[in-house]
Image (cartoon, helix red, strand yellow):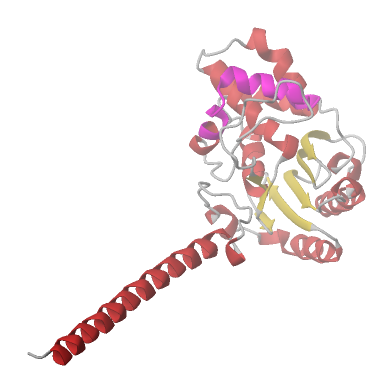
Amino acid sequence: MNKQTKTHIRYVRVVCAVLVLAVITGFCVYMLGKSAGENAAKDGSNGVSSYSFPDIVIDDSKAKEQNIGDLAPLKESLDAKIAQYQGDWSVYLKNMNTGEFFCINDRDFYPASMIKLFAMGACYQQIQDGKISESDWYNTIYSMTALSNNNSFNQMIWTIGKDYLTKWCKSCGYTRTAQYHGLFPSDNGEGLETSDKKNVTCASDVGHMLESIYNGECVSKQASEKMLKILTEQHYRNKIPMGIPYGPKIANKTGDTDDVSHDAAIVYSGGADYVLVIMCDYPQHAALQGHRFIELSKTVYEYFNK
């Protein structure tokens, strides 16, 4: 084999090696790009993380299998009103006398102080189980719920355990409700974080919690009666209760920030006892929507008490 032939063979080998290396590099770049694209699809467009509620088991079967019955005209009326409102609204309604119910736009919301409703139930569960003493903690539970005091809520979470409330909610079937941090403004909320996720709930979970209290099935009949009494002494009555004439017994719990506004109530009226939950997400403007709650509440009350 002459020198020219050997040189030609070495040249061919170098070219082949370069081609193989290019193919391998191209394949690696493709796989990396594919992986990044899949992660971006999970996190949000262009790979930018968007807020979600992972690890929450979504079970909206109760909301889907609605038993509207005679409430169809009322749902149509509420639908029409909400369509004219700004922001994102959700309404859950159940006639406790007939079992008829419906839910409009049953999406997840940041609960704000509405999470205290579930915290009250979790506290009474620990009282029932002998883990904490009602005589020691009743005033704090009352302050947390009836006065919506953030320090009291945080104190109860420190007492029952940072992850207990979420576990209790799931065990009771409130699978879309979870508590991952303390509430502010307060001076004892730091250190309660169990996740970088935000607290979460939905109108149907809130509604089912109130139904359980109404039926005497939340923890126990005795505990339900005590929780109902606390809710009937609620300090904040400027939303659902304001749409109802003076007289009917009302047990309610609110939740408010600049971005969200909520109210949920058990109403004992002559025409029917009912559970009404109204939730609003309207960034920077939620606190100005009180008149909408009153309008929706009045519509519901007048439907049952024509």
Q: Position of residue 33 (x, y in %)?
A: 46, 69
Taking 226 as reference, is 292 above or below it?
below
Residue at horizontal 78%, vertical 60%?
74
> What secondary structure do most residues of the magenta stretch adopt?
helix
Residue at horizontal 81%, vertical 41%?
257
Horizontal relation, residue 194 to residue 301: left or right: left
Q: Does the magenta segment cover residue 151?
A: yes
Q: Nearer the viewer, residue 249 or 258?
A: 258
> How many numbered marks have been drawn onto this rendered protein structure?
0
Q: Nearer the viewer, residue 36 or 144?
A: 36
Horizontal relation, residue 260 to residue 135: left or right: right
Residue at horizontal 65%, vertical 55%?
107
Which residues lie in the magenta part? 144-167
Furthest-front residue in view? 3
Q: Position of residue 266 (x, y in %)?
A: 74, 38
Q: Nearer the viewer, residue 208 or 171?
A: 171
Residue 71 visible? The answer is yes
Furthest-top residue in view? 135
Q: Position of residue 230 (x, y in %)?
A: 75, 24
Q: Does the magenta segment cover residue 163?
A: yes
The N terminus - image quarter: bottom left
Residue 267: image quadrant is: top right
Residue at horizontal 80%, vertical 47%?
259
Horizontal relation, residue 8 to residue 224: left or right: left
Q: Position of residue 132 (x, y in %)?
A: 57, 12
Residue 98 visible? The answer is no
Taking 5 as reference, is 57 above or below it?
above
